[in-house]
Amino acid sequence: MLVSATEMLKKAKAGHYAVGQFNINNLEWTKSILLTAKELRSPVILGVSEGAGKYMGGYDVVVGMVNGLLKDLDIDVPVALHLDHGSFEGCYKCIEAGFSSIMFDGSHYPIAENVEKTTELVKAAHSKGLSIEAEVGSIGGEEDGVIGMGECADPKECKSIADLGVDFLAAGIGNIHGKYPANWKGLSFETLAAVQELTGELPLVLHGGTGIPADQIKKAIDLGVSKINVNTECQLAFADATRKYIEAGKDLEGKGFDPRKLLAPGAEAIKATVKEKMELFGSVGKA
Ligand code: G3H
Ligand code: ZN
């Protein structure tokens, strides 16, 4: 059964580790992530962007697929199904469809409007037992059409959004979606420490988890990050393994064109990436 992300993230914050949010795109992605979480006894959050939800056919398809896998694969670790960078309307659709968690990305609204919309969604989500994430500042780069300027969050704005009753908060601290450029300055731990100081026990979220060096991940967890989002790294691993399979001509040998064979190396590569991240985040054995 799906659970909200509130409890698993409170536990993570208290235990000084982070739970990974891994974005899903299809059956292979979802299966690989869930099987790895089960094998490693780790809680996990499945992230669904609005674009990926549309690609999979719609939110009802996503909920049906995930619930079916939880049952048929006997997944017995805590799993949350979370809307990633949701619009105001998208949040309502996911609440209706049966997600267990939503993110309202109101970072592009003026703060007063972000507050107003977040307040309404906190009520709507909590009335149905879902957890809710909000964003302040903005994550740089682009993810599925969501473009961010990458400015660091104002800790006072973080506090005002935290006080609305959100369950966890994403603060922009110099993190970027996709690959980090060679001249990236690194995470702003000064901003993170100031946000943590004002928001106390609230679990903080680090987006743009792809390619952040291990020492910066560890330091971010020490400073209160309890959820780390990873998307691009699974995509790169999947594409690389699939390319190798095709370039080696495996799809031309025997029944190598069978999608169950063709997609298997990519699915294994996602498992390896998820395992590496769960070990780095410290969530292994916490379920
Ligand atoms: O919301 C999802 C993420 O922040 C993932 O970022 O693609 O850079 O790993 P990433
Ligand atoms: Zn993100």
Image (cartoon, rainbow, N blue to C red):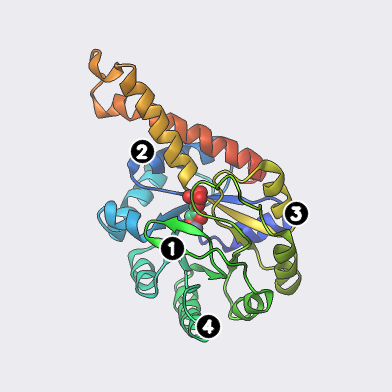
For disc 1, the marked residue is 147
Earlier-in-chain disc, 3 versus 1:
1
Q: Residue flagged by tag 2: what amino acid is it?
A: Glu
Q: Which mark is residue 222?
A: 3
For disc 4, the marked residue is 115
Q: Residue flagged by tag 1: what amino acid is it?
A: Ile
Q: Which mark is residue 28?
A: 2
Task: Using residue 181 as the reference point, say whether residue 226 is left or right of it.
Answer: right
Residues at marks 4 and 2, CA–CA distance in whole angstroms: 37 Å
Residues at marks 4 and 3, CA–CA distance in whole angstroms: 28 Å
* Residue 77 on image: x %, y %: 54, 46
SS for dot 4: helix
Residues at marks 1 and 2, CA–CA distance in whole angstroms: 27 Å
Furthest residue in direction front, as rendered:
183
Q: Residue at x 53, y 39 (%)?
A: 274
Which quarter of the rendering shows the N terminus? bottom left
Residues at marks 4 and 1, CA–CA distance in whole angstroms: 20 Å
SS for dot 1: strand
Q: Residue at x 67, y 68 (%)?
A: 202
Front position among marks 1 and 2:
1
Q: Residues within 10 Å of mark 2 (few under 14, many from 20)?
A: some
The answer, for residue 74, to whether it is visible in the render is no
SS for dot 2: helix
Q: Residue at x 54, y 55 (%)?
A: 176
Q: Is residue 133 above or below residue 30?
A: below
